[in-house]
Amino acid sequence: MLVHGAFEQADTWSRLAPLLARDHRVYALDLTGDGYSRRRGPYTVDHFTRQLLGFLSAMHLGGSGERPLLVGHSSGAAVVTEAALRAPGRIGSVMLLDGDALDTGAGPPPGLGYVLIDPYRTSLLRLGLSTDRLIRSVYDAQCGPACPRLDAAGVDEWRRPLRVAGAEAALWDMLGAGVPGLPASRVARLADVRIPKSVVFGAQDDVFSEQTPWQTARRIGAPPPTLVPGARHLTMISSPHEVAAAVESLARAGTA
């Protein structure tokens, strides 16, 4: 079960999912407010977690022999962590991918309040959607040189969700609230959940410090983290084979 991060979508997994689908059933969903989902808040860990658990129930996942492996990317790490805490008997294993699940530093950056006031925010969004440069710049900064270059179709894949009905209002609401996360004490409770866990980060991920992967692994009771050489914050795009191997390793641990 693949759970994307803030301002991402199910399509973000398009390079990784086919590799996993060779031997597994693979699911990915658009959390409320992102991708092609309905734009209806609140955009919180609680709301996202209830959506994830509801999806698992709808797909009849979580029973004996059907306990899913959850992969949460970036802020999605908080969602899969909370899901495992709320329903540990329904989850097979958990991977935090490029995310520490914490709420630290998740607030809006200084000065953003001025940008969120119309007409500035409307002008900013329309300007960003009218040119490929902004999308390419953000993608290149987050993904790094190991990622495939965005062609016109790739740019459109990132742009289209911003044109879904209600997307503009949802975007500003989410930016104003900050990236969702959990208190450290809540994340640490995952260490008491008796399921296999793993932490995977890009070795050059500059969203977090060099110590974050190790601190996260210790906090949740996971083995030492897997660091993907040359990767930044979008390892499932830059390094799908390495991430797939880490998922397979965790799946074997869960089976055992």
Image: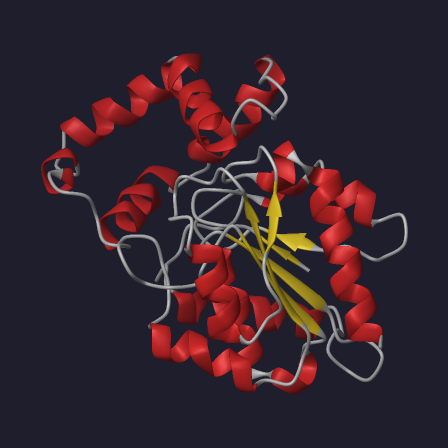
Quadrant of residue 119 in the image? top left
> Which of the 4 image quarters holds residue 165?
top left
Q: Where in the figure is residue 247, as x and y percent of width and height?
A: 73, 56
View extreme (right): residue: 23
Residue visible at 68% across and 81% down? 90
Q: How is the image coloured?
A: secondary structure
Q: Is residue 225 above or below residue 195?
A: above
Q: Is residue 159 left or right of residue 251?
A: left
Give the total number of marks visible in the rendering. 0
Between residues 184 and 85, which one lies in front from this camera angle? 184
Residue that appears at 65% across and 42% down: 13
Q: The C terminus is located in which quarter?
A: bottom right
Q: Is residue 11 visible?
A: no
Q: Position of residue 193 (x, y in %)?
A: 59, 84
Quadrant of the rendering where the N terminus is positioned:
bottom right
Whether 118 is drawn above or below 39: the answer is above
At 30% from the left and 17% from the top, the residue drawn is 127
Q: Quadrant of residue 167?
A: top left
Horizontal side, residue 126 vs residue 146: left or right: left
Q: Is residue 56 visible in this depiction of the protein?
A: yes
Q: Give how far across and how far down residue 244 sits, in percent.
A: 75, 48
Q: Whole-percent x and y of residue 69?
A: 71, 66
